[in-house]
Amino acid sequence: MDQDKVSVLLAVPADDLETSSVRETMQSIASQSYPASLMETLLVQYMPNIPGGRTAALNAARDQAKGEFLVHTEQGVTWDPSKIEKQVLRLREGGEGAGVGSAHRVSVRDATGRMKQTNFDLIHRVGLRVSSLLLAPWKPGALLIRSDTMADLGAYRHIDQAVWEYDIRLASKGLSVELLDEDLAVWNVDMDPAGSLVRELVPSGMRESFLKRLLDQTAPGDLVAEGGNEFPALLLAGLHLFNDDLETSHTISQSFGRESVAANFWHGVIHRREPDFGNARGWFERARSWEGLLQIRDAVQEVLERVLLRPEYGQTRDLAFSLKQHLDSEGIWDSEYFVDMCERFSEAGVPDEMEETLLRAVQEAEMVAALEWTYRCAVN
C-alpha cells in the first residue's frame, strides 16, 4: 500500500465505455489538483446483465488497488478539481483523531437539467448509524476512505444496493467519517436511484428487501445504547416504517400497549398508511400529550411555507394555507386533522396529483421529525 496514494475505482458497464458521461468523469479525475503521481484510476468494467457481475468487478479492483485511500465513483459524476486534495488534507489535519474517511456534498442534476443540492442534515440530526438505514448517506464518488478500513469491512455483497449496504456496514461499526460541508461534485443522472425520504401515503409494498434483512437482525441496543426506556425499540419501529414494512413496525409498536404515548403515535402512523383511518384516529387520540408533536408542527410549517411560495401547486396552495391556519390555531401538530385530509384524498374519484405531492411532503416532514425526536429521547 503506497502512502498518500489515492486509488479511484470507476465502475462502468462494458457497453458504456465510450459514452460522453464516462469521458467527462475521467476528465474530472485527471484534472485533480492532487499530484498525478499519487493517483491511480482503475476502470471497473462489468456486464450489467450478469448477476453479481458489478460487485465481483468492484471487489477484484479493490484488491488490485495500491493506494492508501480509495474512492468508488460512477459515470456521470464530475468532481471539483480540489476534491481529492481537500479530502486527504482533512484526514491529515485530523491526526490520530481523524475519521476513517471523508465525505462531501454532491449536487444532483437530473435529465431535465434541474439541480438538487444535497446535505448532511439527516446525519447531524439522527447520527450516521440511523441515517444510513434510511437512505444512502452520501452520493457516488463522495466518500474517500482508508484502504485498510475497506479491507477490515470485507467485500461488497452481491446485491443491487451493494454500495449502500457497504455504507451501512461502515456506520454499524461505529467508525467516524469526516463530513465536508462543501459541494465538490455534480452527479448527472436521469433519476436519483437513492431517492428521498418522501414515502407513498399508502405503500404498495416493502421498499428494500436488503434493509428488511438488516433491520430484522438489528436489536434496539445496536442503534443507540439502551438506557432502560422505550425509545430505542421505537426508533427501530420507525426505521421499519420508513422501509414500508408496516407489519414489523406494528408488532414493535403494539408491544407497548396503550401506556406509551410515543408508541401510540407511531401506531397511528402505521394504521393511517394501511389505510385504516378509524383505527389511526383512535391511536392518535391517545398520543395527544406526546411532546414530539410540537417539533412535528414546526417541521410541517416549514413545508407549508415553501409550498405557498410555489405557483406550480396551484389551487393546492389553498389546502396548504388551510392546514397552516389550523396549526397556527392549535399551536401543535394535529395528527387526527391530517388523517381527515388523507381520507378525503383517498376517497376522491380522481385524485389530484399536486394534492398528493403536498400530502406526501407533509408526511415526510412528520415522520422525519418524529424519528428525530425519538432518537433524541433514546440517546438522552
Image (cartoon, rainbow, N blue to C red):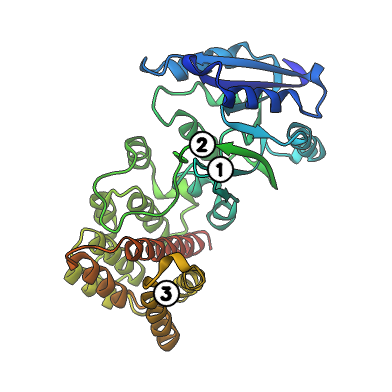
Position of residue 180 measured from the top left corner of the image (x, y, whole percent): 70, 45
Check contact, mark 3 vs mark 1: CB within 8 A: no
Q: Residue at x 70, y 28 (%)?
A: 28
Residue beneath disc 2: 189
Q: Are marks 2 and 1 in contact (CB under 8 Å)?
A: yes
Q: Residue at the location (45% across, 85% down)?
A: 328
Task: Examine the rendered structure and indicate whether residue 189 appears above or below residue 320.
Answer: above
Q: Where in the figure is residue 124, as x and y percent of width and height?
A: 59, 55
Asked if 330 appears above or below 68 in the picture, the reply is below
Compare marks 2 and 1 and give the one earlier in the sequence. Answer: 1
SS for dot 1: strand
**Which SS class for mark 2?**
loop
Question: Can you identify the residue that label 3 sits on?
Answer: 293
Alpha carbons under labels 2 and 1: distance apart: 6 Å
On the question of residue 315 being in view, the answer is yes
- Is 235 displayed left or right of 74 in the figure? left
Marks 3 and 2 sit apart, C-alpha to C-alpha, by 37 Å
Q: How many marks?
A: 3
Which residue shows up at 59% across the image and 26% down it? 72
N-term-proximal mark, 3 vs 2? 2
Q: Quadrant of residue 32?
A: top right
Image-based side of 256 in relation to 181, left or right: left
Mark 1 crowdedness (10 Å alpha carbons): few <14, some 14-19, many ≥20 = many
Q: Amino acid at mark 2?
A: Val
Point out the frontmost of discs 3 and 2: 2
Extreme bottom residue here? 329
Tell which circle, 3 or 1, labels the residue nearer the N-terminal end. 1
Q: Is residue 247 above or below residue 101?
A: below
Label 1 sits on residue:
109
- Number of residues whose C-alpha sits closer than 10 Å to that of mark 3, classed few (under 14), some (14–19) or many (20 or more): many
Q: Nearer the viewer, residue 211 or 340?
A: 340
Q: Position of residue 220 (x, y in %)?
A: 40, 50
